Image (tube, rainbow, N blue to C red):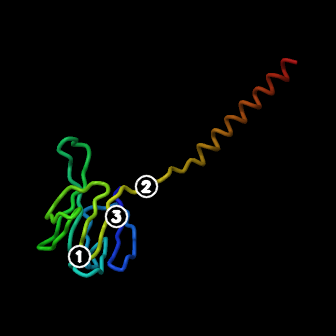
Amino acid sequence: MLQLQVTDERGTVTSHIVTEFPLLIGRSSRAQVRLHSAGVWEEHAQIYLAESSRYPDQHRYVLQSVGQSLVSINGEIISGKELAVGDEILVGAARLTVSLAPPAQKRLAVHEWLVWGLLLLVVVCEALVILVAE
């Protein structure tokens, strides 16, 4: 999953984990990432998934400006460009840093109990074998 770390003009940092695409960035109430910094349009930019030309079963993240809005990635003004980890996006006075969200850890409690139960069963069986052999 994609993660955007947003730093506004006051230096306030917020983090957004992106789970649905297309993702709208702007001031609008429809925007999934709302920015209230100077220079941000109602609908400023969007991030969407596109199929990879080299690997059809994989996707890539693409940032595209909406309308005549200005967006830059790593200091280069773009209308659309593929995102990479570490990219810095400027949307008005806000800075967004692209990263991958940490993977969610699976709940392993059931598996742990099964393993401990099996170990206990082995110990009990070994103890019975020792008692019967005497």
Q: Amino acid at mark 3?
A: Leu
Say what secondary structure mark 3 lies in. Answer: strand
Q: Residue 27: name its quadrant.
A: bottom left
Q: Residue furthest left?
A: 68
116 versus 77 height, above or below: above
Q: Nearer the viewer, residue 69 or 75?
A: 75
Q: Residue furthest top?
A: 133
Q: Which residue is mark 1?
A: 92
Q: Position of residue 5 (x, y in %)?
A: 36, 66
Instruction: Please give the name of the residue rendered at 71% of the width and 30% of the height, measured from the top-left corner.
Output: 122
Say what secondary structure mark 2 lies in. Answer: loop
Around disc 2, counting alpha carbons within 10 Å, would you say few (fewer than 14), some (14 to 19), or many (20 or more)? few
Q: Which residue is mark 2?
A: 102
Instruction: Please give the name of the residue rendered at 27% of the width and 54% of the height, measured from the top-left corner.
Output: 84
Q: Amino acid at mark 2?
A: Pro
Q: Residue 119: name its quadrant.
A: top right
Question: Contact, CB < 8 Å: mark 2 with mark 3?
Answer: no
Around disc 3, counting alpha carbons within 10 Å, would you say few (fewer than 14), some (14 to 19), or many (20 or more)? many
Q: Residue 83: name its quadrant.
A: bottom left
Measure the C-alpha gap from mark 2 to mark 3. Answer: 12 Å
Q: Which mark is residue 4?
A: 3
Instruction: Please give the name of the residue rendered at 20% of the width and 73% of the height, measured from the top-left corner.
Output: 44
Measure the C-alpha gap from mark 2 to mark 1. Answer: 27 Å
Indicate which disc, 2 or 1, sits on the residue closer to the N terminus: 1
Q: Amino acid at mark 1?
A: Gly
Question: Contact, CB < 8 Å: mark 2 with mark 1?
Answer: no
50 versus 43 height, above or below: above
Indicate which disc, 3 or 1, sits on the residue closer to the N terminus: 3
